[in-house]
Image (cartoon, coloured by chain):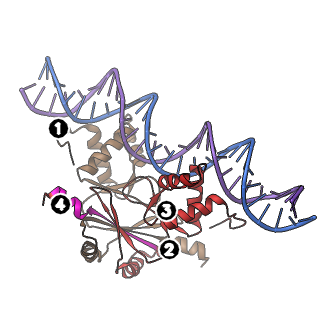
Chain colours: A red, B brown, C purple, D blue
Amino acid sequence: MQELKGQRVTNQRRLLLDLIRRVEGHLDADELYRLAKARDPHVSLSTVYRSLRLFKELGLVEERHFIEEHHHYEVKGGIEHHHVVCHGCGKVMEFECPFVERMKKDASNKTGFHILGVEVSMEGYCDRCQERIEGV
Amino acid sequence: MQELKGQRVTNQRRLLLDLIRRVEGHLDADELYRLAKARDPHVSLSTVYRSLRLFKELGLVEERHFIEEHHHYEVKGGIEHHHVVCHGCGKVMEFECPFVERMKKDASNKTGFHILGVEVSMEGYCDRCQERIEGV
DNA sequence: AATGTTATTGCAAATGATTTTCAATTGCAA
DNA sequence: TTGCAATTGAAAATCATTTGCAATAACATT
């Protein structure tokens, strides 16, 4: 967005980005911190946050807002997908949504916004939790 | 979810729910606190949070997760709608989305989840901010 | 390889949002 | 009107994230 001069490729950044890429799924800052510390015991949590913000600004990772307070991060790129979160156990599943393009146009017409991103998040109960609750 | 015994109808709860209902839009906890304090100077912020949580659990209000850290709340009921948030000025607009039912079925088939809620949130730039940025 | 500049780091303290603790108060059923 | 449990306000605690600052490390230039 701004400040694109002289970013440096540091060990911690390499490590962190590598981890985010390797671990597929939806890491939060703390999980990433723990993983990173396992490999390099003196990375700091601040650096994790700072790097996440940088990666986000550079468009390398995306930030997700699920039910919880804290955020989750995943690599950008690949197929666009969306998320269902289970209220029972917190499980997150991804799915592709064939309607987003149409929704985008539709919403743009209705609101006058120039729309950059669409996030569809659903909540409910995963198959396992349905059984547990309904006692099938 | 649990504990549905003996809830009491107190002045502050009446006041808070009344405010949320009266003020249409997307209040956050702090705005609600300020509004409430204007009418009854000694409501506390804790009570605002406690009441919001209660209302949410009772299904009276819904919690929204926009770009910002803190949450926004709006009365449940009325027509189901979704949100676009402007990156430039933070403006939030609502729109109705004709695809949600289809999306819900589609996602349910794909993931096996029993889906209770769908939230479509879009981000971009509102008409005013588009002009400002593109210098039209 | 040695140097200087400047981005980056780690740590600790600061912040912002929300939750909890606890003693005092209040709603409500008896 | 009494009694008890639910609710409240105020302050402290917690959780997620950010920031200030002095020490360190990257990288371009000698």
Whether labels 3 and 1 belong to a single chain: the reply is yes
Depth-wise, is mark 3 or mark 1 nearer the camera?
1
Indicate which disc, 3 or 2, sits on the residue closer to the N terminus.
Answer: 3
Mark 1, residue position:
B6
> Which amino acid type corresponds to the residue marked 3 in the rendered image?
Gly
Do callouts 1 and 2 point to residues on the same chain? Answer: yes
Query: Which residue occupies 60% across, 77% down?
Result: B134
Of all chains, the one bearing label 3 is: B
Secondary structure at numbered mark 2: helix
Give neighbour class at mark 3: few <14, some 14-19, many 20+ (Cα, 10 Å).
some
Q: Secondary structure at mark 1?
A: loop
Distance from the alpha carbon under mark 1 to that under mark 4: 30 Å
Same-subunit check for callouts 4 and 3 = no
**Side (left or right) of D9 relative to B89:** left
Q: How many marks?
A: 4
Q: Nearer the viewer, mark 3 or mark 2?
A: 3
Query: Upstream in the sequence, badge 1 or badge 2?
Result: 1
Question: Callout 4: helix, strand or loop?
Answer: helix
Q: Tell me residue A125's x, y (percent).
A: 25, 61
| Cα–Cα gap, marks 3 and 1 | 40 Å
Asked if residue A66 can be seen in this view, the reply is yes
Q: Amino acid at mark 4?
A: Glu
Q: CA distance from mark 3 to mark 2?
A: 12 Å
Tell me the kind of residue under disc 2: Asp
Instruction: Point out the stretch of residues depicted in magenta.
Output: A117-133
- Which residue is tagged 3? B90
Q: Is residue B71 above or below residue A108?
A: above
Q: Position of residue B41 (x, y in %)?
A: 39, 35
Write down the residue under mark 2.
B127
